[in-house]
Amino acid sequence: MKKQVFSLVSLALISVLLLSACSGVGAVLASTIGKLNAVQAAPQASQSTSDSTSKSSSNTALTNPSTLAQATGGSDLLTAYENALEAVYTTVNPQVVNISVLTPATVNNFQNLPGFNNNNNQTQQYSQALGSGFVWDTKGNIVTNNHVVDGATKIEVTFSDGTTVPATIVGQDLYSDLAVIKVSVDASKLSPVSMADSTQVKVGEIAIAIGNPYGFEGSMTVGTVSGIGRDIPTRTTDQTTGASYSIPEVIQTDAAINPGNSGGVLVNDQGQVIGVTYSLESSSGSNSGIGFAIPAEIVSKVVPSLISTGSYQHPYLGLSGTDLTPDIAQAMNLSSDTRGALIETVTTGGPAAKAGLQGSNTTVTINGTQGLVGGDVITAIDGQTINSMSDVITYLSMHAQVGQTISLTILRNGQTQTVQVTLGSRPSQ
């Protein structure tokens, strides 16, 4: 019964938060809290009576949903909460599409039989996969994850009204895992999304995922933003150097995200897209309460370029590194409170190498693990403090562009220097 009470009270308070854009919300919140306090005080006021009377009063006030709803106005707030979610769904669901793709899959005939050359007994077959996407504009451009459509020989898009049409790939970006596909339909069927400013997203805000998990079209799940500023490794590496890359500022949510949600939307309580549902962290392959969305800020930078040129050029330094932890700082004879991004390796011929930046060359063992130290430590970019390698990745993705010259403040052998680096373009795959 305690869980039931907690759920009702929680929903009431969440409803107040959802009404924060309305006038007089302070009075509503104060009134609701006052009523909750009054309900909680009721058992205390009856302490002078017998224990049985006190318990009865407590049970009536706190475990009877109708009594609690009447005392707090919870039924009205719950209705407002439900109405808010229904309004978001009504607006956003027509903007989200189901994507079905066919990709080549080669299988061997007789592969388990002896005496056959499997390489000469192959039949071309296809595998089908499902994903999600959303309408970008009235020209027929649809945004989704690149991994949903990459390598597809056939793509079909199904709208919320059941209309199914073929689609073609317009542009792809492996590094942000975004792609644009295009359909040819009447503009009346195209309801573009509204993009939010994801840099203003805060932990605790309402997060609503709409997509096609397991092919169940138009599914909505609700949760909160449970983390921000995550760096999630991309699904590709540099084939020349073997370097891996990350997508910065990824939004974490506990709204259920499952296979088939990829490429769908994560929206706020106004129905604005704060991110593109991208992946989930799970040992079972299904939702475990941790899902990730590519932030709207990156989507808004990448998608227009995919539409106009078919690709996106990512700013490139040509180095790899790690956070300067207290242990690493001490190993480099630096103060343990020194923070920054330690350069481990510099790519030959890359922008960092041309600028004279130096990688690490001394092997040390820290907490039983060997690593390289001694390289330059980046402490600021264009005057903005850098505390980690994640900060470097975020700055390049959010504030820099190919061909731009940036100013790096570094520590080299304990001495502060400034180095100018002209950014290149990340190698294409």
Image: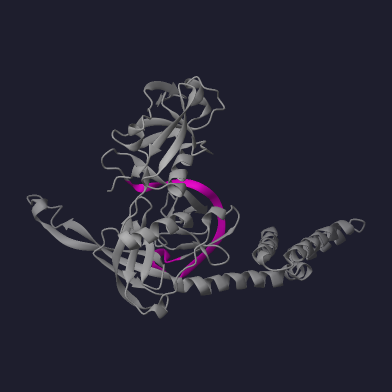
Toward which corner of the image does residue 149 lie, by quadrant?
Answer: bottom left
Residue 323 is covered by the magenta coloring: no
Percent x, y of residue 224: 57, 57
Residue 229 is covered by the magenta coloring: yes
State the residue in front, 307 or 135: 307
Query: What residue do we see at 43% from left, 44% from top?
Result: 396
Toward which corner of the image does residue 49 lie, by quadrant?
Answer: bottom right
Query: What residue do we see at 56% from left, 52% from top?
Result: 226
Left or right: residue 157 compared with residue 104: right
Percent x, y of residue 133: 40, 65
Range drawn in magenta: 211-236
Left or right: residue 152 compared with residue 116: right
Residue reaching furthest top? 333
Question: What is the quadrant of the N terminus in the image?
Answer: bottom right
| Main secondary structure along the magenta-highlighted residues | strand
State the residue in front, 120 or 365: 365
Image: 25 above or below 427: below
Left or right: residue 210 compared with residue 423: right
Percent x, y of residue 96: 43, 69
Q: Is residue 217 visible?
A: no
Q: Is residue 28 visible?
A: yes
Percent x, y of residue 122: 13, 57
Q: How is the image coloured?
A: one colour
Query: What residue do we see at 40% from left, 61% from top?
Result: 263
